Amino acid sequence: MASSKPVSTDVLTAFGVDADAPLKALPGGSLVCYLAGDNVVLRPSEDDVESQQIAEILRKLNNLMQPSAPYRVSNPVAVATNPNCFVYCGWTAWSFVSGEPREEFRWDESLRTCRGFHHDIGKIGIVKPEFISRRMNRFREADLVAWGEKGLDQLPVTTNPAVLSRIEAPMRRLEALKREFTHDLPNQLVHGDMAGNMLFDEDGKLPPGIIDMTFYWRPGGLGAAIMVADRLLWNDEGDEAVKMYGTDADSIQLLLRALLFRIVTWAIDIVVVDAEPDRIWAEKMLPVVDFEAAVEIVSKFVTLDD
């Protein structure tokens, strides 16, 4: 008789989890993850090579984290029979990171968490992981455009005319405002969606937890820039948000690229989860996001050439 459990007993046993542990579906994300008991999360693997490499990266990060780190991250759980293997039959296992999303955004805490994480992960000292170049989706395509490695006219599939009419002018303006960086900004691993993936301790005794590692290979400061870009686009933040983030020339250039990255994703009609829900989401959210205002705010801080 086939098991009705969402995660098989074989998988649970492979990761050393009690086969009778209750499984609870966790909210959020494009994948359904399950909390087994109180402290292990089972997550489906979309790409076994990428999942293995991310687990190895997070293990290294956990090993170098200081007790005073301003963030928490999950620790990968190895297969019981192989301490260096983190994927089994299409599943990975992770230590549970407690906390809940918070509606109230606190700039000081969020920026400190983001920058602390990127400072530490930059110290791991790894070369660019293979999966970053191999992964091709809407977000990866937008990343290439934002960094001048692909032209707007080279996007694979463009979205519907209503969306294009809203984003074309902001995209062109951001491209015109881009300048070279004044300092060498080495590439490293960057979490590309941190604002929506922080969990906060109810009592405030623990630092924020960071989940759903979505990595890019860019300067470390881009993580905070994407966080600010999201607040400008979705939350009616103004000049003060940019000032709290930083207004030096390189920070603003990172923010320009972060905004371009976010806006270009709307121009690409590649399925992320399911084609119909993706299109419904885009049509519903289009009136809510303010591309023009976000670009106008950032443009004030760009130092123009003489």
Image (cartoon, helix red, strand yellow):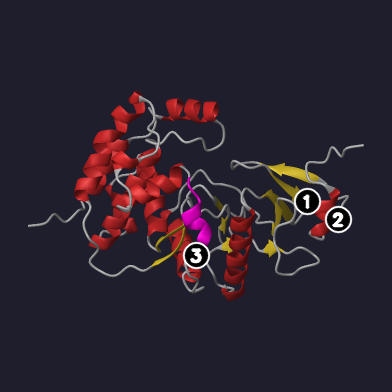
Badge 3 density bin: few <14, some 14–19, many ≥20, Cα 10 Å:
many
How many numbered discs, if any? 3
- Residue 281: numbered disc: none
Find residue 13 and report its image quarter: bottom right
Q: Is residue 134 magenta?
A: yes
Asked which secondary structure carries label 2, the reply is: loop
Asked which secondary structure carries label 1, the reply is: strand
Amino acid type at circle 3 is Phe
The reply to whether dot 3 and dot 1 touch (C-beta < 8 Å) is: no
Give the magenta-colored segment's residue range.
Answer: 129-136
Using the numbered discs, state the Cα–Cα distance from disc 3 to disc 1 in whole angstroms: 27 Å
Q: Is residue 181 left or right of residue 189?
A: left
Question: Is residue 74 placed above or below 142 in the rendered structure?
Answer: below
Q: Which residue is mark 3?
A: 117
Q: Which residue is mark 1?
A: 36
Q: Is residue 177 left or right of residue 73?
A: left
Q: Residue furthest right?
A: 1
Main SS category, magenta section: helix
Badge 1 density bin: few <14, some 14–19, many ≥20, Cα 10 Å:
many
Q: Pinpoint residue 31: horizontal percent, then vertical percent.
A: 63, 42
Using the numbered discs, state the Cα–Cα distance from disc 2 to disc 3 in whole angstroms: 32 Å
Q: Is residue 119 left or right of residue 84?
A: left
Residue 83 in view (yes/no): yes
Quarter of the image where the N terminus is located: top right
Quarter of the image where the C terminus is located: bottom left
Find residue 38 and report its image quarter: bottom right
The reply to whether dot 2 and dot 3 touch (C-beta < 8 Å) is: no
Q: Pinpoint residue 267: horizontal percent, then vertical percent.
A: 37, 35
Q: Which residue is mark 2?
A: 18
